[in-house]
Image (spheres, rainbow, N blue to C red):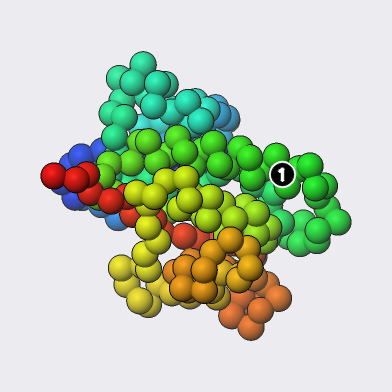
Amino acid sequence: PTAAAAPTAAAAPTAAAAPTAVSAAARGFRGGMVLGCDRSKSRLAQVGKLAERLGLGSRVALAALDATHAAEKLAAGGYPTQWDRIVLDPPCSSLGQRPRLSWATVTTSELEGCAEYQRRLMSAAVGLLKPGGVMVYSTCTLSPDENEGLIAYALREHPELSLEPPEDPALVLGDPGWRGCGLSAAECELVQRFDPSSARGEGSIGFFLARLRKAQAAA
C-alpha cells in the first residue's frame, strides 16, 4: 500500500493505509472520514470487503492512486487534500516477514529502490498532513535504511516534523531504534523496532513504527 486515511473526532478528514490500518482507523474514531489509498485495485477491493464485513463500509472510501502524487489525485477526485491523521504503510523490502527473514533474499538495489520510493511517499504525505496533525509510519522490514534512516530523512527534510511517543505508554511494546542509522539516541527511544531475534520481539515478525507530529503553523 501507499498511503491511507483515517477520520478525526471533529469529523474532519484524515488519512491511512492497508486493510488493518483502514479498519482500525474507522473503528477508532467518531465521525469523520477514512480514505484508503493504494495503487492496486485488487488490494483496495480486499479493503472494501473487510470494511463491509466489519460493518464499516459507510465509513471508508477507497481511492486507487499512486500516493507520490496524492494531493493532485485527491483534489481531482473531489477529496480533501489536508488530513488530521495519516498512516503511511509503504511498500518495503518485507525483510521482517517470514520466510524473507534473511538479507540474502534481497539485493542492494532493491533495498535502495524501496528507500527512495518511501522518501517520495513521505514527502507527499507531509504535504497532506494538517499543521498539528499526526502521522504514523510503519514497515514490515528490518532494513535500517527503510526505518531509522527514513525517519532521519523526514526530520531533516521536513523540520516541521517531530517524533513523539504513543499517547498511551502501554503501547510502547517494541525495542528502541537502532543507533548509528541516522537518529540520535533520544530519537531512537521514540521509535519502536520489533525484531524476532530480540527477547521482546520473540515470536513476532519484524516491523517498525514511528509517530510524527507536524508543527502548528506560526500565528
Please say if 43 is above or below 107. Answer: above
Q: Amino acid at mark 1?
A: Glu
Quadrant occupied by the N terminus: top right
**Looking at the image, which is closer to me, 47 or 168?**
168
Q: Residue at x 68, y 58 (%)?
A: 143
> Is 83 placed left or right of 201 in the picture?
left
Q: Which residue is mark 1?
A: 112
Q: Residue at x 71, y 44 (%)?
A: 112
Q: Position of residue 145 (x, y in %)?
A: 65, 54
Quadrant occupied by the C terminus: top left
Element at label 1: helix
Q: Position of residue 25 (x, y in %)?
A: 35, 50
Q: How many marks?
A: 1
Mark yes or no: residue 94 visible: yes
> Is 216 placed left or right of 43 in the picture?
left
Q: Residues within 10 Å of mark 1 (few under 14, many from 20)?
A: some
Tell me which corner region of the image, top left, top right, bottom left or bottom right, holds residue 42.
top right
Q: Residue at x 23, y 49 (%)?
A: 216
